[in-house]
Amino acid sequence: MRPSSKGTRMSEPQETWRPRLAAKARLRWDKIEQQHMLMFPEAALKLNATAAEVLKLCDGERTLAQIVDALLDKFPSAERQVVEDNVMQLLTRIRTRGLLED
């Protein structure tokens, strides 16, 4: 394992993973609910503000470490390990549903 740019150790697959929303998934702001929704065929997931911020960063360009770095820049009082763990849990759930591409 190699350290990421900010000193955290991540496994190789996590270091190189550049998640992006699958073609069938869309991040949308719901005016009625006043929150972000992850829309996909015949279903939708309501997202809290933090989950929406994570998915906005899943553009296929950023690695997992870069996504975490961007969140830490936005929320500097957060602990890196907590952010990493939460991001991985969210992305794993979204990926399991087939809504993320590698």
Image (cartoon, rainbow, N blue to C red):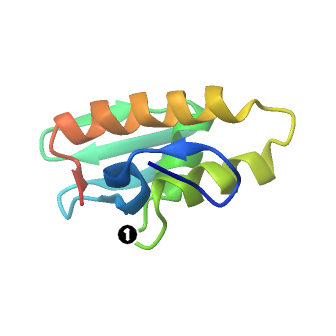
- How far across and down, in percent of the image, does residue 48 sit? 55, 30
Residue at image mark 1 = 60
Q: Quadrant of residue 69?
A: bottom right
Give the vertical position of 73 relative to 30 (above or below): below
The one of 25 and 31 positioned closer to us in this rendering: 25
The residue located at (22%, 47%) in the rendering is 99
The residue located at (44%, 52%) in the rendering is 28
Residue 3 visible in this rendered orientation of the protein = yes
**Figure label count:** 1
Give the vertical position of 65 relative to 94 (above or below): below
The residue located at (29%, 30%) in the rendering is 93
> Does 81 sit left or right of 73 as displayed?
left
Give the vertical position of 15 relative to 8 (above or below): below
> Does 91 sit left or right of 23 as displayed?
right
The residue located at (50%, 36%) in the rendering is 87
Q: Secondary structure at mark 1?
A: loop
- How far across and down, in percent of the image, does residue 68 sit? 61, 48
- Bin the neighbour count of mark 1 within 10 Å (Cα to Cα): few under 14, some 14-19, many 20 and up: some
The one of 2 and 74 positioned closer to us in this rendering: 2
> Does 53 sit left or right of 62 as displayed?
right
Q: Tell me the kind of residue under disc 1.
A: Gly
* Residue at far bottom of view: 61
- How far across and down, in percent of the image, does residue 52 sit? 53, 43
Residue 31 visible in this rendered orientation of the protein = no
> Does 82 sit left or right of 94 as displayed?
right
- How far across and down, in percent of the image, does residue 18 sit? 37, 63
| Image quadrant occupied by the C terminus | bottom left
